[in-house]
């Protein structure tokens, strides 16, 4: 690594074993203030600040007692939940292994598996009042395909929310390319009092990710 000129910007020399793309990623990480802050404050990822900033705007964490974190890896969002809601029950799920987080139950399994929804509720000990989803499909480099694959995960997460949330509960999910599509937004509006899109400051400007925040679940029809 070498120091570039001005304001302590760290520049990374391209190594033979490292591609130009990975070199750019490493340089961006080393100079990202959120990455530095996360390391200093003990968070596992800069994504913790996305959730913090969304909560500062929409105040969905306050009063939550049972929380589900879909796509928990590496655990930054659950760390925020545990810090702000130390008495809340928290259950997370991910395909990837996740190091333990004090006070949280972590399931390593596919959320799309038939057994996953019931297992989440069983581990949670009751209906959730907040469902968080930072799930995104593995990208293939084709923007439309990537957006559609992630949209499928958001649809599954919303279906889970509608089937399990406590009345008055909230649902927060990552979406791509400017937000959820019109049919998905319409479904949210049928089931929640308010539906908003937001891009928190911690989300990189060049990123296509946005977040949808649906609050005030109306409850299931009997």
Image: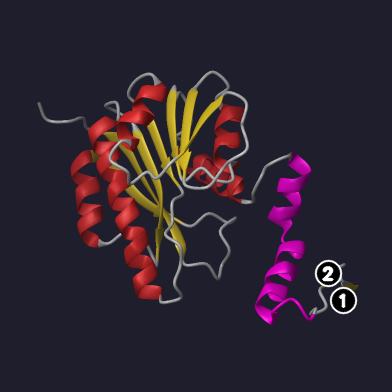
Say whether residue 181 is magenta: no
Residue 209, given in percent of the width and then of the height, sits at: 46, 62
Whichever of callouts 2 and 1 sits on the residue coming sooner in the sequence is: 1
Task: Name the quadrant of the C terminus.
Answer: top left
The residue wearing badge 2 is: 10
Residue 16 sits above or below residue 195 on the image: below
Residue on which disc 1 sits? 4
Labels 2 & 1 near each other (Cβ < 8 A): yes
Magenta stretch, residue numbers? 16-41
Q: Quadrant of residue 19?
A: bottom right
Task: Indicate whether 176 appears above or below 219.
Answer: below
Coordinates of residue 106 in the picture (x, y in percent):
51, 33
Q: Which residue is drawn at the image coordinates 38% and 19% (left, top)?
A: 125
Disc 2 to disc 1, C-alpha distance: 6 Å
Look at 39% across and 65% down and name the residue there: 178
Dot 1, crowdedness within 10 Å: few (<14), some or many (≥20)?
A: few
Residue 129 showing in the rendered view: no
Is 31 part of what is drawn in magenta?
Answer: yes
Specify whether 200 is left or right of 24: left
């Amino acid at each position: 690594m070498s120091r570039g000129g001005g304001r302590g910007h760290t520049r990374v020399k391209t190594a033979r074993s490292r591609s130009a793309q990975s070199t750019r990623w490493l340089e961006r990480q080393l100079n990202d203030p959120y990455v530095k802050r996360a390391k200093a404050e003990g968070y596992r990822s800069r994504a913790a600040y996305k959730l913090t900033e969304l909560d500062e705007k929409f105040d969905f964490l306050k009063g939550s007692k049972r929380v589900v974190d879909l796509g928990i890896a590496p655990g930054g969002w659950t760390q925020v939940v545990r810090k702000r809601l130390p008495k809340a029950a928290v259950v997370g799920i991910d395909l990837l292994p996740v190091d333990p987080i004090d006070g949280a139950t972590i399931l390593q399994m596919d959320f799309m598996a038939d057994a996953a929804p019931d297992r989440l509720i069983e581990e949670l000990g009751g209906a959730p009042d907040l469902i968080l989803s930072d799930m995104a499909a593995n990208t293939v480099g084709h923007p439309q395909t990537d957006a559609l694959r992630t949209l499928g995960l958001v649809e599954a997460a919303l279906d889970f929310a509608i089937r399990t949330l406590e009345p008055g509960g909230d649902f927060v999910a990552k979406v791509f390319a400017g937000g959820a599509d019109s049919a998905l937004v319409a479904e949210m509006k049928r089931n929640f009092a308010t539906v908003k899109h937001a891009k928190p400051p911690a989300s990189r400007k060049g990123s296509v990710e946005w977040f949808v925040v649906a609050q005030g679940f109306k409850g299931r029809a009997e």
